[in-house]
Image (tube, rainbow, N blue to C red):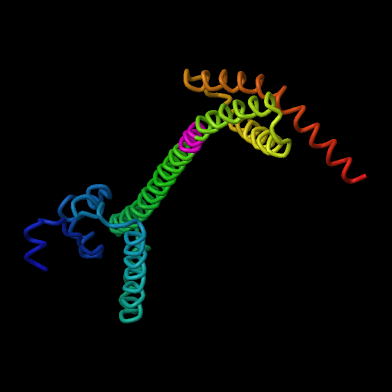
Amino acid sequence: MTDLNDDLDLPVTKELSRELVSNFVRKNGCLDIDKLLLENNFQYVSLDELSYEVSALKQSMEQTILDEINDNYPEYMEICDRFNTSDNNEVLNKLKQVLNDLQQFNKQLLQLCDSSVAETREKTVTALSYLKSLDNLFGKLDDITKLSESLKICQQLVSSLQSMVQLNIDDELSFTVAKQLSTILIRCDYRFRHLEDNDSTLITRMRNDFKSILETAKPLIKPVLEKQNQQTQTIKT
């Protein structure tokens, strides 16, 4: 496994520890958070893991201070007394600067986390919007395909119904064809409403074909359905 890592030359991320921060400050003279993170490959660490390491470092430092106080309380009190004198203002200022640097580090890390979360959220919203657009596009393509097939069937049914009416073929069969034709025309009208914002040449041609079929079909369908309805009412009475 080690040989594989060596061959791939994978980036190595160090553990975020007091020693790492102290060595960095000694080397660079100040605590540059961005530089610290980049030099130690923390950009390859997840935000959750990095946040966990910062919290662990904070707890470790707090615990170390408490341990030092408990183990060396008299010396600690002596140091505190010295800090209260004007002769040790320089030392106190340096400690305050260290505290300020740590606070800045924590603040910048939180800002980095917030920025990354916001960026991730924005990318997710964009991706979802894109997928929704694709879904709408596929839905419209499906409508167009079904419309084309439905219009062909309507034309065939209109021709069949015309022949039946002219030849006075069985009323029951004529009614079945008329009812089926009426149902398909209603579905076509519904799909065209879904494509109201589409003014492409193909859709325009299909709309014109639909209007032509509708104009031919209406005078054929109406009398057949009315006749069937009258027969049904007669049977009931």
Q: Is residue 138 magenta?
A: yes
Q: Nearer the viewer, residue 120 or 136?
A: 136
Picture quadrant where residue 47 is located: bottom left
On-image quarter of the N terminus = bottom left
Q: Position of residue 71 (x, y in %)?
A: 31, 81
* Predominant secondary structure, magenta span: helix
Horizontal arrangement in the rendering, residue 152 relative to residue 214 (left or right): left
Q: Is residue 44 magenta?
A: no
Horizontal arrangement in the rendering, residue 113 relative to residue 132 (left or right): left
Residue farthest to the right? Answer: 237
Horizontal arrangement in the rendering, residue 189 relative to residue 79 (left or right): right
What is the span of residues highlighted in magenta in the rendered image?
A: 136-145
Q: Nearer the viewer, residue 27 or 98?
A: 27
Q: Position of residue 58 (x, y in %)?
A: 35, 65
Q: Nearer the viewer, residue 12 or 153?
A: 153
Q: Position of residue 172 (x, y in %)?
A: 72, 39
Picture quadrant where residue 10 is located: bottom left
Horizontal arrangement in the rendering, residue 237 relative to residue 53 (left or right): right
On-image quarter of the C terminus = top right
Q: Residue at x 58, y 25 (%)?
A: 196
Relative to 102, is 178 above or below? above
Q: Nearer the viewer, residue 137 or 10?
A: 137
